[in-house]
Image (spheres, rainbow, N blue to C red):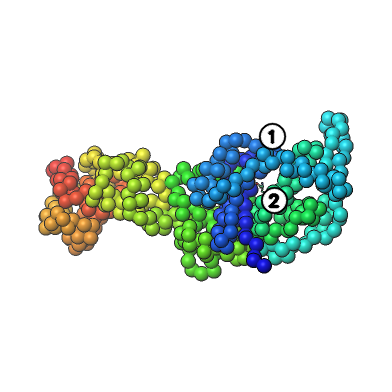
Amino acid sequence: MPEKKIKTRFAPSPTGLLHVGGIRTALFSYFFAKQHGGEFLLRIEDTDKERNKPEHEKEIIFGIDWLGLDYGPTFFRQSERTEVYNGYLKKLVDSGNAYISKEEIKEEGQRAEVVRFKNPNKSITFTDLVRGDVTFDTTELGDFVIAKSMTEPLYHLAVVIDDYEMEITHVVRAEEHLSNTPRQILIQEAIGAPRPVYAHLPLILDDQRAKLSKRKHGEKVSLKYYIEQGFLRDGLVNYLTLLGWNPGTEQEIFSFDELIQAFDISKVQKSGAIFSEEKMRWINKQHIGRLPKEELYARIQEIIGQDITGEKLEKVAEIVKERIQTFGDLKLMKEQGELDYIFHEPEYQKESLLFKGKGDFALIKTHLEKAISFLETIPESEFSAEKVKAAIWDYASEVGRGDVLWPMRFALSGKEKSPDPFALSALLGKKTTIARLHMAIEKVS
Ligand code: GLU
């Protein structure tokens, strides 16, 4: 018999922002399905009418698309499937597996109907790809509620019916659902559904080992925040996939396609994974370094302006690549005027040219004149950071590097924070570099 096609799903409830934990669940489900030539579907679990919001659903769909998790035409909304659930509910009641129960609503002193599942009270053992065999005694669950009425199915029932009808073979989801699994298995058995294989993913914790939550960590738990921070898709995906999984080798940097191959669900750890924005930024930087040139250039232009082109753009890119971890960093640099020197002549007081506020102007004049004389020897077409460094280095080392390089750097950038004077010279080109050094000499003369 041919093996059954592997099918996984991402089944978020649109009750809050799209959490990085949810993203990791979606990624693991997706990688697992794709590496087995299987299918991945998206199912919006919107049975909780009070807490669902259309904007959350929109954010989920946007996020899954941004991540490039292709679910093809297999998109479902539970709110559109009530009829299906009602049919099963009726069968469960007719067969004696569930019953309508009239109950007092405590606060209101009213009586209402709920549908309860008739618990056979037994021990259930299921296989979890992360945790191994897990056993629960269902007795303590009692006859649990599966619907508010014969037309209002609740979560456990809907999940089981959907996973059955959609032929889900592997349920990959967050650890918090582990304790829901025995209830869902009881329902499966009652409707005659096969049992999927489970994989419950470890919690994501902060550095104090507290669960990453909206309440405690605010927007920093949301995908939206990291998109706004200018993370690359591949950087973000790479980092989140390392939360609870590692390849067991030294390799840390993976492209999206490499992850589809390398990810191994049986190597996912049980214990909580610590989230570190710092590490995530570092990984993102590695991906910026791997971007094809055209893409890097286009992203830089988008932020600093389309009028920077050609050789200048190449040089800016080289400098920027070293200094940013996300494109949000570049935006910030631009906003804080850190890149102004690319566009305008710097404006500053001559005192800024003094290294550590000390020294004298006559000496600065001598050093800058010397620097110019060295730079003059480099042909314009070879005016690279390496050549500039080679031309000036010996002199600077001899008379004091800070005393030469600081005024030079300040004369070129007009900023406390900027790349080194060699990179700046290459970026600005021979003519502008020498002109700016002359300007500084004028100031101190
Ligand atoms: N809708 C559930 C949630 O958002 C997920 C259910 C499941 O994956 O089985 O947490």
With respect to residue 284, does 51 lie above or below?
above
User: Which dot marks residue 165?
Assistant: 2
Pinpoint residue 273: horizontal percent, then vertical percent. Answer: 59, 58
Where residue 6 appears, as percent x and y from the top left, is: 62, 60
Q: Please rate how many residues cluster around mark 2, counting C-alpha atoms within 10 Å: few if below 14, some from 14 to 19, many from 20.
A: few
Asked if 441 appears above or below 237 in the picture, the reply is: above
Front-lying residue, 374 or 395: 374
**Residue 24: percent from the left, percent from the top?**
57, 53
- Quarter residue 435 falls in: top left
Using residue 390 as the reference point, say whether residue 146 is left or right of it. right
Q: Quadrant of residue 218?
A: top right
Q: Is mark 1 within 8 Å of ligand 1?
A: no
Q: Percent position (x, y) of residue 110?
A: 86, 30
Q: Residues within 10 Å of mark 1 (few under 14, many from 20)?
A: few
Report the amino acid beneath label 2.
Glu
Tell me which amino acid carries mark 1.
Answer: Glu
Q: Which mark is residue 50?
A: 1
Looking at the picture, tell me which residue is in the foreground, 324 or 178: 178
Vertical order, 134 against 11 (above or below) = below
Q: Is residue 174 left or right of residue 412?
A: right
Specify which label sits upstream in the sequence, 1 or 2. Answer: 1
Report the Cα–Cα distance between label 1 and label 2: 26 Å
